Amino acid sequence: MSIDPEAIITRFYPAGSTTRDLLLRHGELVGRKALEILERADWLNADRDFVVQSALLHDIGIGRTRSPELGCTGTLPYVCHGVEGRAILDRLGLERHGLVCERHVGVGISARQTLQRKFPLPVRDMLPLSVEERLICYADKFFSKTDNGRHEKTIDEITAGLARYEAEYADRFLALHRLFTGGPVNAAGLPNSTQYTR
């Protein structure tokens, strides 16, 4: 499907706005990282056009959150930006892109975690499943939106940051790291051994 992610972002965030500039800059960094990974991981069968589009659109829901440091003046907690992004893209008929929005937050959020941590989210598993969903989720963790992409995080920095929230997040990230740096995969291009705890 041919779409113009920049035009979609501009529809919700006007040219010159802090949020639009941030989304484009962060999305380009995530997209570039995802493509670099695919260059090295030739055993993966991924839709590269979809990966680039999704990299740009995966955070489109942030404007509905209360995140002034990102130029966002909405009312929702930041953890809701994935679900909100999915709602936006679903209304545009971009359901597959919407799933990337919903499933990239943290390293995916399970229904169990939503209940245990009392997240203001629908109680359902929102874990990345497809190669493309997992790739955007993984590549996203290397860049913070608050530092203008000046620093690409190391694996240790990422896992330490995730572990501060929950050890399971760090474990999920390391499972994605193994997937994208080598290891046995099945006919669908997914790892034979990677399991997501629910």
Image (cartoon, rainbow, N blue to C red):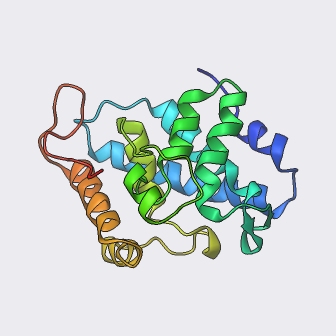
Question: Residue at image x 67%, y 38%?
Answer: 87
Position above or below: 187 against 11: above
Q: Using the rendered image of the protein, determine whether residue 138 is visible from the camera's viewpoint.
A: yes
Question: Residue at image x 36%, y 71%?
Answer: 166
Question: Residue at image x 51%, y 66%?
Answer: 143
Question: Residue at image x 57%, y 52%?
Answer: 121
Query: Tag count in the figure?
Result: 0
Q: Using the rendered image of the protein, determine whether residue 35 is visible from the camera's viewpoint.
A: no
Coordinates of residue 177 in the picture (x, y in percent): 27, 57
Position above or below: 64 against 53: below
44 vs 146, left or right, is left
Position above or below: 83 against 65: above
Coordinates of residue 54 in the picture (x, y in percent): 56, 40
- Which quadrant of the structure image shows residue 17? bottom right
Quarter holding the N terminus is top right
- Which quadrant of the structure image shows residue 65? bottom right
Coordinates of residue 107 in the picture (x, y in percent): 40, 57
Identify the residue at the far top of this view. 1
Coordinates of residue 158 in the picture (x, y in percent): 38, 72
20 vs 191, left or right, is right
